[in-house]
Image (cartoon, rainbow, N blue to C red):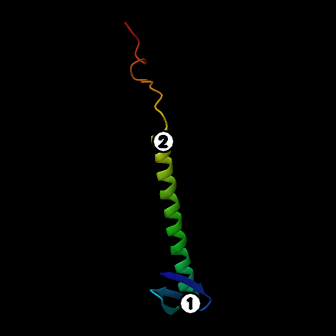
Amino acid sequence: MIIAPRNDGIIVSVDGKVHHLPQTPDQMMQMALRCQQAAIEMLTQERREAASAQSASQPDSGLDDTNDCLPSG
């Protein structure tokens, strides 16, 4: 599938068949905003996954701070 914006609407190609979808300027702006929001969500998810993978791959320091914080005696 290919989607191509034009100044008179959107061209959509599916399996070699090309379709022209006329759009008003307001419809084009709404489509652009939806595409931008989807891209932001994709980037956010990608960054979360990368951060999670990086923290999972960092070696554990081996320190257990729960045992040494209580005073002896």
Front residue of this view, candidates 14 and 40: 14
- Amino acid type at circle 2 is Ser
Front residue of this view, candidates 29 and 4: 4
Q: Is 8 left or right of 59, judged from the image as shown?
A: right
**What number of labels is visible?**
2
Q: Is there a contact, CB below 8 Å, between mark 1 and mark 2?
A: no
Circle 2 SS class: helix
Q: Which mark is residue 21?
A: none
Residue at point 50%, 44% (across, down): 54
Circle 1 SS class: strand
Label 1: which residue?
Answer: 9
Front residue of this view, candidates 7 and 24: 7
- Residue 58 lies, in percent from the top left, at 49, 37
Structural crowding at the residue carrying mark 2, measured as other residues with C-alpha within 10 Å and reported as few (<14), some (14–19) or many (≥20) = few
Residue furthest front in the image = 16
Residue at point 52%, 73% (across, down): 35
Residue furthest top in the image = 73
- Amino acid type at circle 1 is Gly
Q: Is 9 left or right of 72, judged from the image as shown?
A: right
Label 2: which residue?
Answer: 55
Q: Is 23 left or right of 7, judged from the image as shown?
A: left
